Amino acid sequence: MLTVYIYQKCSTCRDAIKWLDLHGVEYTAKPIRETPPSRKELETALKLMDGNIRRLFNTSGMDYRAQGLAERLPGMTDDEAIALLTSNGNLVKRPFVIGNGLALTGFKPDLWSKALL
């Protein structure tokens, strides 16, 4: 079963949910701010994304900019970065999808079609 972490006020997340529903993809939705992805989920996603930790971060978000993560992230260990992500769901790129041996961040219909259909 897929788990999709979303922020209800995010239009991209709403578009992703509509896409999943339209294509009959089963999922469980979780609020990303209140229930950020777990350490295990993020570690799994990191492996599936070839170890590119930056792909897990919402680099356009206010929290990312306020914490100066563009400068700090390259010097952080994966453990430090994952600890930040688990403590603040605003830092996680959304929608964040994990399950069935795959991980996706952001919503790109072409990529989602290849991965999920």
Image (cartoon, rainbow, N blue to C red):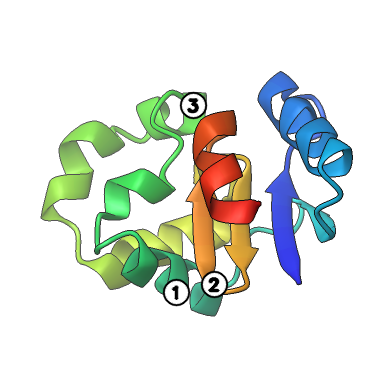
* Residue at left offset 37%, top offset 67%: 48
Q: Earlier in the sequence, mark 3 or mark 2?
A: 2
Tell whether label 2 touches label 1 (CB within 8 Å). Answer: yes
Between 75 and 8, the residue placed more toward the observer is 8
Disc 2 secondary structure class: helix
Q: Kindly identify which residue carries mark 1.
A: 44
Q: Kindly identify which residue carries mark 2.
A: 41
Disc 3 secondary structure class: loop
Where is residue 76? Give x, y as percent: 19, 58
Where is residue 100? Give x, y as percent: 62, 73
- Amino acid on which the number 1 mark rests in the picture: Thr
Does residue 9 appear in this view?
yes
* Mark 2 nearby-residue class (10 Å; few <14, some 14–19, many ≥20): some
Residue sitting farthest toward the left = 75
Mark 1 vs mark 3, CA separation in Å:
23 Å
- Amino acid on which the number 2 mark rests in the picture: Glu
User: Which quarter of the image is occupied by the N terminus?
Assistant: bottom right
Please give left or right for residue 71 compared with residue 95 in the image: left
* Residue at left offset 31%, top offset 72%: 79
Q: Kindly identify which residue carries mark 3.
A: 61
Does residue 108 appear in this view?
no
Residue 91 against residue 51 in the figure, above or below = above
- Amino acid on which the number 3 mark rests in the picture: Gly
